[in-house]
Image (tube, rainbow, N blue to C red):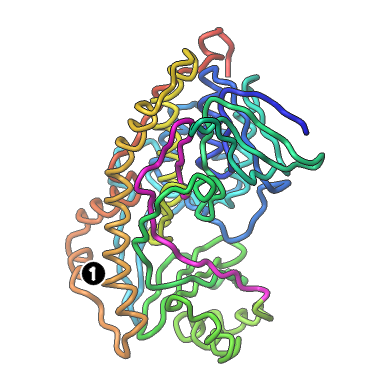
Amino acid sequence: MAEIKTNVCVVGGGPAGLMAGYLLARAGVEVVVIEKHGDFFRDFRGDTVHPSTLELMHELGILDGFLKLPHQKVSQLGGQIGDEKFMMADFSYLNTKCKYIVFMPQWDFLNYIAEQAQKYPKFNLRMNTEAVDLLEENGKVIGVRAIDDNGELLIKSNLVIGADGRGSVVRKSAHMEVEDVGAPMDVLWMRISRKPSDPAETLGRFDAGKILIMINRNEYWQCGFVIPKGKLEEYKIKGLQSIKERIVAMAPFTCDTVDDITSFDDIKLLTVKVDRLSKWYRDGLLCIGDSAHAMSPVAGVGINLAVQDAVAAANFLYMPLLKGNLNESHLRMVQERRTYPTRMTQRAQVLIQNNVIKPALESTEMKAPWFTQVFKTLPPLRALPANLIGMGFRPEHIHSPDTRQQAGVMK
């Protein structure tokens, strides 16, 4: 059985895990990040990079390179209820380097962060390496039992960071208590070709009993068809044509492209969860991102909240990790720092789920709510949702150091 030792083992090569690994290695902490897949290519993962994350990339000096990758920029977010369109969030009001959301496939984002991290000798990314259990000694987590291409692998570490998503093996192995906040819907993700004559806006379309999210990806629409929680089998019984007809009813311009969806194999189910751990840490273990708090897809904030967790973790933990005096009080500080934005974001998502999404799915008649008229008549008010969506309730800043800069090495 192979065995390696490191200061930190990060489980999960998603936004939280890679960013945490990058920042800690950048600060001089030896890190091993393990990712169970051989690459980052997974379709229909969150791909909205918000101004809060772009601001962090600017602070790190890696924003310009990131923006050279293929992407779309959206400076306003709106919706359509019936035939009435409205604009809800205008990011041009933000006091940030980037006054827009970037839409980019998540695998491109992850590849870019991994590329930046690998410039630091303390960073080690091991693909095709799956965590199967935690290693414990006298109640303390001391590493991870994993499987790679060569068989079983023991990774001994001073800290394990669980960043392996909403189905986290880490938090399950640690027997951590989960608070289920609840969600009334699931989402069916699919692609439909986009014609040059199609409208350009990225919109949420609401109608009686139907909700469709359409994200403009230039050559295609990334579509999220919202269904009541656990009702996929009912839609399968009704047949694929029923879903196509509902899509065309909300977006008539898709009438000659909706047949791109040829079977339910072309549809990816996102089972929506909103939950959080009561306690994010144990001695030798910290959970961040979706492992600590699964977010609803409402407003697409999941990636960005996960990245903020990683920044906070690096800010608080790099020094005790370097000094070798890490203890539970340091891990508690990370949770205390991130609890407020997590709870407030989930509270806002649940408010929207229960007062907008659920009534829309259950309604037989859809009318535009009062606030759409407010945003129409008073455009500056669009700055408020733009700030909440774009920056969040407690945006983080980079306080961990850069060993390359300290050594006088140009980035």
Q: Position of residue 166 (x, y in %)?
A: 50, 54
Q: Position of residue 399 (x, y in %)?
A: 39, 23
Q: Please, which residue is most extreme toward the top here?
A: 407
Residue kind at label 1, given as amino acid type: Thr
Q: Position of residue 223 (x, y in %)?
A: 53, 70
The answer to whether residue 191 is left or right of residue 201 is right
Quarter of the picture holding the C terminus: top right
Front one among 177 and 390: 177
Is 147 situated above or below 9?
A: below
Question: What is the number of callouts on the image?
Answer: 1
Front one among 348 and 249: 348
Return the residue at label 1: 372
Front one among 86 and 59: 59
Front one among 12 and 297: 12
Quarter of the picture holding the N terminus: top right
Q: Residues within 10 Å of mark 1 (few under 14, many from 20)?
A: some
Q: Please, which residue is most extreme toward the front here?
A: 138
Task: Name the residue rendered at 45%, 78% in the picture.
Answer: 227
Quadrant of res 52: top left
Task: Name the residue rendered at 55%, 7% in the picture.
Answer: 408
Q: Is residue 159 magenta?
A: no
Task: Name the residue rendered at 62%, 21% in the picture.
Answer: 122
Q: Is residue 276 magenta?
A: yes
Quadrant of res 235: bottom right
Is 37 situated above or below 356?
A: above
Q: Position of residue 310 (x, y in %)?
A: 45, 35
Span highlighted in magenta in the image: 265-290
Q: Secondary structure at mark 1?
A: helix
The answer to whether residue 384 is left or right of residue 293 is left
Task: Name the residue rendered at 39%, 43% in the picture.
Answer: 51
